[in-house]
Image (cartoon, rainbow, N blue to C red):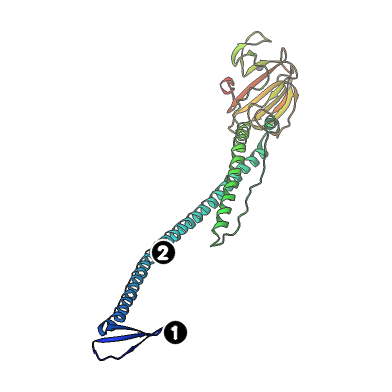
Amino acid sequence: MRSIGVPNPNRMTLLVLRDANQPVKQIQVSKPLVVAVPLLALLSISGLIVSLHMQSEQTISRLEDRLRTQNLTIEAVVTDKNEAIQRLQNEVIALSGQSKEMMGRMKKVKQLEAELQKFIDKHGDPQQLGKLSTLSWNDSSGIGGEFIAVHDNEIEVLAQETKDDFVAISNLLDEIEKNVPLTLRKAKQTEYSLSGTPSEWPTLSTRLTSNFGYRTDPFTGRAAFHAGIDIAGKVGDPIYAAGAGKVITTARDGSHGKYIVVEHPGGLQSWYLHLHDIGVSEGDTIIKGQKIGSLGNTGRSTGPHLHFEIVKGGSPINPLPYLD
Ligand SMILES: [Zn+2]
């Protein structure tokens, strides 16, 4: 298509050349229209571009805003998480310290219990302890859980270690709970055995045939002072020490028969007369309830019995208030 100049200045003629066999076609158009159409097209395209550009800028701006908000949120969450981790770490460290302290205390308690046991083993009466031997006594010294050095940043290691410590503490507590009551019973038994107060009934029989004080003498029939109590029994019945102490006399004479004198820590003496057998020697240390001889009929006696006497400051006193 091309335009050809024509005399009319306000009009333009467009010649349309088609196929070679076809005639040339003339189209008359006004000049302003030729200018206006491309201009309008250009303007509308420009407007479209400007509009698209503005829209994209808005979209970018919105996206940027959203990203900023999201970033702030993420930062806040990360800060929270970091604080939570810090708190947890502090708690685990504190917990670990507590468990170590507890372990230390438990070990001390365990040591105390072991010392108590040693005391009983050293001072306890094998006969008396034998009575307790039916109770199972588990003197395990095993205390689990060696301490592993704590690495500053390995919080998981520390947590696991703390768990292990608590398991060990729990086991230790089980053991102590099981052992301490038995140890205490043994300790009480030991304490009783070591008690110097002559309070244990000195033989099997409890049949009193003569009391402390004035009585008619069985041999002379005259009034006489009886310095102890007479307990009837069978020859060979065991005679027990009424309290812990030291054997100061084992002897025999026509009046006392075979006899034993025990001196107790508090200053009292206990006398055991008319024995069949003497089972201890002078100088022996004995514990309460220990068998020291057997009941007999020796000396100035009318039948098998034990004459039991307690002497305080050189004078006989009524033994009955002392005896259980
Ligand atoms: Zn007597």
Kindly indicate the quadrant of the structure image that contains residue 61.
bottom left
- The one of 224 and 148 positioned closer to us in this rendering: 148
Residue 107 in picture, x, y percent from top left: 59, 48
User: Does residue 36 sit above or below 271 in this rendering?
Assistant: below
Residue 319 in picture, x, y percent from top left: 59, 21
Quarter of image, ligand 1 = top right
Around disc 2, counting alpha carbons within 10 Å, would you say few (fewer than 14), some (14 to 19), or many (20 or more)?
few
Q: Which mark is residue 75?
A: 2
Around disc 1, counting alpha carbons within 10 Å, would you say few (fewer than 14), some (14 to 19), or many (20 or more)?
few
Amino acid type of the residue that numbered disc 1 sits on in the rendered structure: Asn
- Which numbered disc flags the more N-terminal residue, 1 or 2? 1
- The one of 122 and 246 positioned closer to us in this rendering: 122
User: Does residue 272 sit above or below 38 in this rendering?
Assistant: above
Q: Which residue does the image show at 68% across and 25% down from the upper left?
A: 240
Q: Which residue does the image show at 35% across and 67% down from the upper left?
A: 62
Instruction: Measure the C-alpha gap from mark 1 to mark 2.
Output: 79 Å
Nearer the camera: disc 1 or disc 2: 1
Task: Judge left or right: residue 135 versus residue 58.
Answer: right
Q: Which mark is residue 58?
A: none
Q: Which residue does the image show at 58% across and 42% down from the upper left?
A: 173
| Position of the C terminus by quadrant | top right
Amino acid type of the residue that numbered disc 2 sits on in the rendered structure: Glu
Task: Judge left or right: residue 300 versus residue 43.
Answer: right
User: Does residue 277 sit above or below 110 in this rendering?
Assistant: above
Q: Which residue does the image show at 68% across and 21% down from the upper left?
A: 203
Q: Contact (CB < 8 A) between labels 1 and 2?
A: no
- The one of 112 and 20 positioned closer to us in this rendering: 20
| Position of the N terminus by quadrant | bottom left
What residue did someone put label 1 on? 21
